[in-house]
Image (tube, rainbow, N blue to C red):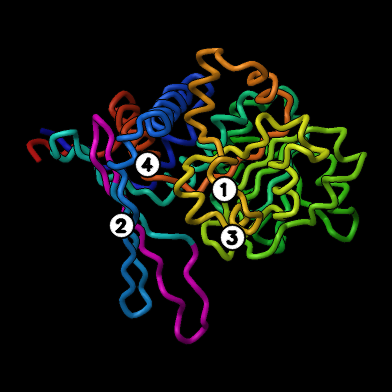
Amino acid sequence: MSLTVLTDRTVTGLLTSLTAPTLQPILTSLGSALTTYALDGAEKAHQPHRAVVNRSGQVSLFMPSSTTSHIGTKMVGVTPADKQTSKTAAGLNSVLTLCDETGRAVGVLNAAGLTAFRTALGIMLLYRFREVTDSIVVFGAGKQALWHILLALVLKGDAIREIVVVNRSRERAEHLLQSVEQSGASTDKIRIFDAEKESLEDVVTAADVLFCTTPSTTPLFPASWLLTDKARRKTRFISMIGSYRLDMQEIDPDYLRKVVDVGSELAKDVLGAQVAVDTRDGCLAEAGELAKAGIEGDKMREVGEILDAQEKGSEAGLDAWLKRGLVVYKSVGIGIMDIAVGSSLLDLAQKEGAGTTVEDF
């Protein structure tokens, strides 16, 4: 049995070379995994919660998961802050180990960039249906922001007029644009928000898409901005992936309460008065803005359920909502996403002759 090793450089090379056609099999694999997770009640029992070990300030996370074809564990190391400067190291150290269904190892992948890619790809599962995506606002300037931008350009590049990056540090935002260029993509449609020359409220309310990718503990903007008569003339796609603890929040809980209120002024644009989530259980445990808004599980709809209904054409109004309605999507991540994307990347590496193969492992 051979084992394939993919370094960070190899993973980055494979991911940045993706086109719309070569991205499709990975999107399909991820969508299928989340659909099985959402529809098969027994499947959730095979996805144990992550374990956290804290030793002398070094935080280590162990995230096991399984599908019918693979078993895997992602390990993440959060380096403690430097004792002299109190600054934390940039990025996370992460590795994904994949085995087949019998437990035989088939791959080891550097998962630092892979994690950001699979999270952004999860958002693309619903974003790809949007009809109007003229103006995009991205909050944040890290790897998550990078992959939201790159994937949006791959899937909807011709339909995008501008992408505005909003970040407290202009230096980090400029570095993000450099990373986009280094990936081989054009930055012609991307600009950095300038607080001295423009209004953030105007930029937000003019946006068709809001990608939120920051670990913020306060809302990125007040709910009132999106509740004016003028703002409500436009429906939007809003995604939140940056907050992963109950003390974090990106979208104002007051706005989210309106989204799930069947009697609110937003009701006509929100199918079923629900927010989309990748995992209901995960969001109940970790999504700070949903918790602060008091949103219970019956007001959350898993993306796997949405994709299944969309494929079957079994729900009135679903296609119109995905294309033109107000879609609010919260993702906290789940291990099967790593397995789905990681195994697809191993398949791609084999086709491309990339990576290092260890025979008779």
Which element carries disc 1, helix, strand or loop? loop
The front one of 184 and 31 is 31
Coordinates of residue 86 in the picture (x, y in percent)? 51, 81
Residue occupied by mark 2: 62
Crowding near the residue tagged with mark 3, few <14, some 14–19, many ≥20 C-alpha atoms within 10 Å: some
Work out whether mark 1 precedes mark 2 in sequence or the reverse, and give the earlier one.
2
The front one of 198 and 333 is 333
Q: CA distance from mark 4 to mark 1?
A: 26 Å
The N terminus lies in quadrant: top left
Numbered range of the magenta stretch? 65-90
Work out whether mark 2 precedes mark 4 in sequence or the reverse, and give the earlier one.
2
Crowding near the residue tagged with mark 2, few <14, some 14–19, many ≥20 C-alpha atoms within 10 Å: some
Residue occupied by mark 4: 338
The disc placed on residue 237 is none
Work out whether mark 2 precedes mark 3 in sequence or the reverse, and give the earlier one.
2
The C terminus lies in quadrant: top left
The front one of 212 and 331 is 331
The kind of residue tagged 2 is: Phe
Please tell me whether residue 155 belongs to the stretch shown in magenta.
Answer: no
Which element carries disc 3, helix, strand or loop? loop
Q: CA distance from mark 2 to mark 3?
A: 20 Å
CB-based contact (under 8 Å), mark 1 and mark 2: no
Residue positioned 31% across, 23% down in the render: 351
CB-based contact (under 8 Å), mark 4 and mark 1: no
Which element carries disc 2, helix, strand or loop? strand
Work out whether mark 1 precedes mark 3 in sequence or the reverse, and give the earlier one.
3
Q: Evaluate whether residue 188 shows in this view.
A: no
Residue occupied by mark 1: 296
